[in-house]
């Protein structure tokens, strides 16, 4: 019967110490920058509403604006990983719908 490995108090203290001394490579974004990004996204949404782009392309752009806004709201909780997730989704969407993005 397999034994469940448990982290001992000593191991936990070692891990805690390591987390304190290891560098944090995550870039910090302050609240002013987040608010500026939200403002820019609102402006982009307004632009999208008043243009002559194909409806499918408009919908894709609006969907990703919404995902970016959600990432900005959850950044303080989840960290920069939320932006990586949004970028991965956008890359996939670009590959999937490259025909909509071709210059006409």
Image (cartoon, rainbow, N blue to C red):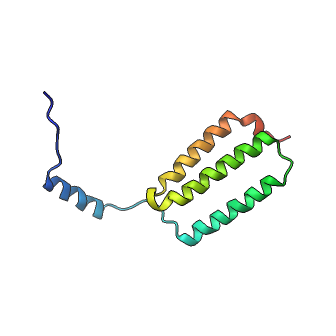
Q: Quadrant of the C terminus?
A: top right
Identity of the residue drawn at 74% across and 62% down = 43
- Pick the front one: 98 or 71: 71
Q: Count the labels in the image.
A: 0
Q: Quadrant of the N terminus?
A: top left
x%, y% of residue 41? Answer: 68, 59
Q: Is residue 30 left or right of residue 47?
A: left
- Pick the front one: 71 or 12: 71
> Which quadrant of the figure has residue 101?
top right
x%, y% of residue 29? Answer: 52, 66
- Is 95 placed above or below 83 here? above
Q: Is residue 61 left or right of residue 12?
A: right
Identity of the residue drawn at 76% across and 34% down = 99
Q: Is residue 11 left or right of residue 19?
A: left
x%, y% of residue 95? Answer: 66, 36
Q: Is residue 29 left or right of residue 64?
A: left
| Residue located farthest toward the bottom when viewing the structure as drawn | 32
- Is 55 placed above or below 83 here? above
> Which quadrant of the figure has residue 19?
bottom left
């Amino acid at each position: 019967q397999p034994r469940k490995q448990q982290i001992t108090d000593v191991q936990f203290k070692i891990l805690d110490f390591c987390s304190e001394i290891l560098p944090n490579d995550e870039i910090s974004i302050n609240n002013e920058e987040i608010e500026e990004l939200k403002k820019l996204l609102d402006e982009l949404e307004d632009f999208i509403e008043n243009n002559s782009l194909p409806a499918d392309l408009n919908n894709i752009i609006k969907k990703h604006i919404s995902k970016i806004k959600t990432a900005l709201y959850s950044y303080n909780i989840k960290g920069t990983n939320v932006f990586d997730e949004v970028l991965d989704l956008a890359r996939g969407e670009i590959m999937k719908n490259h025909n909509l993005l071709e210059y006409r």
